[in-house]
Image (spheres, grey):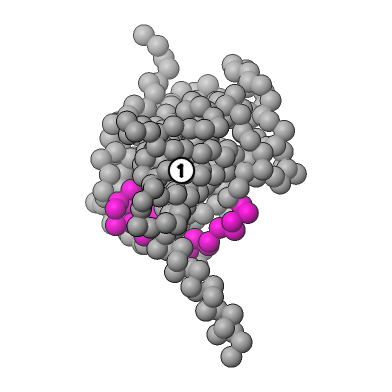
Amino acid sequence: MSDQPRLAEAGDDAVALRETSRNYLQMVAQSCGEKCDALWAWNEFGLWIPPEDPSAAFEEVQWIFGDCSPEDPATVEILWKSWDEATPAWYRMHIMETYADRPRPALRGTWANPATGLVELADVVAVRPSIEGLPLSCTQTASPTFRPSPLRPAADPEDLLPEVTMTQAEAELMISLYLHLESHRLGPLWTTIDAQAAATRDRLLDIINTAGAAGSRTDINITVAVRDTSVSQCPHHVFDPAPAYTGVDETRTVGLHEVAHAHKDGTVGLEEHGHGHLRAVLTCVALYGGSVHLATVPLDGSAVPVATESLYRVHYDWRCELVEDAEQRQIRNLNDMIAPRDGGR
């Protein structure tokens, strides 16, 4: 029987995922000759797994996040089963304070909706420090009642147009590099990010197919927030170097331009690249973050002769979010027209 801990599996609940994570951390600590406790896991590995015992979880959360406040929050990535989800998913949030209840310890967090609420540790699988400067997640982004966050600035139209085309081979390499990096950072929990990103990619594909089937032509502009995610000196895996456009001094926008059109049988055809190419680039959007801007020309004879535009973003949190649809765009354009007039009074 293998000593390796099993990988996280789709549908696992918080308890099962915590057990998988603890087994992995114990194996790593043993190989390093370290004691596997919360101090080592948080300070050396950058990952905290809440204990099953509420009292122990309360003590540890006070030690790690007890100094957090609304004025000085901690930005973290948290694998958490939200109120409206069946299984845990990753979020980026601010921890504002701890909830001092030993039987049911919790964190008070805030997201970009804006929304603030309690996150009970019984529903938390893991917490890790986030990269500074990244935007917070929104909750309930897949709900039909979701509205774009007022904290999201409108995108510059120039930033939505790819200047460099990402090839299918480059996209597949970037996917492998990203998931390989996460396997080093998270151990067997890397599969939770893989599954979350796959769901986001599939949702983006559905959005594109729906738009393509509704009009005579849909212009699709996709951008990817690429960066080099190579792991240096990995003794087990070797990959090709990341594309040159991932360099820190590279400023060109990378992505894909595509045109979709509806067929009489209800399917959607692509005019510039294959479906496999589109799927690979959208997977990169789901992993690295980016945008999908759609402009759909109505079918012949439509009562609405102008193109319908919508913009979706992935804010580097493996979650697709509607940033702007036709209604929001019209409101923003009106506000832009009103602002100079009011400013001149």
**Rendered-image quadrant of the C terminus:** bottom right
The amino acid on which the numbered mark 1 sits, given as a three-letter code, is Arg
Q: Position of residue 143 (x, y in %)?
A: 30, 51
Q: Residue at x 61, y 33 (%)?
A: 166
Q: Is residue 154 magenta?
A: yes
240 over 139 or under it: above or below: above
Q: Which span is picked out in magenta?
A: 137-159
Q: Residues within 10 Å of mark 1 (few under 14, many from 20)?
A: many
Query: Mainly helix, strand or loop, the magenta region?
Result: loop
Q: How many marks?
A: 1
Q: Residue furthest front?
A: 301
- 264 vs 246, nearest the viewer: 264
Q: Quadrant of residue 174?
A: top right
Q: Residue at x 54, y 72 (%)?
A: 336
Q: Is residue 61 shown to the viewer in this render?
A: no
Q: Quadrant of residue 326?
A: bottom left
**Rendered-image quadrant of the N terminus:** top left
Q: Position of residue 155 (x, y in %)?
A: 56, 58
- 218 vs 143, nearest the viewer: 218
202 displayed left or right of 231: left
Secondary structure under the numbered disc 1 in the rendered image: strand
Q: Residue at x 39, y 37 (%)?
A: 262
Q: Position of residue 331 (x, y in %)?
A: 44, 69
Residue designated by label 1: 217
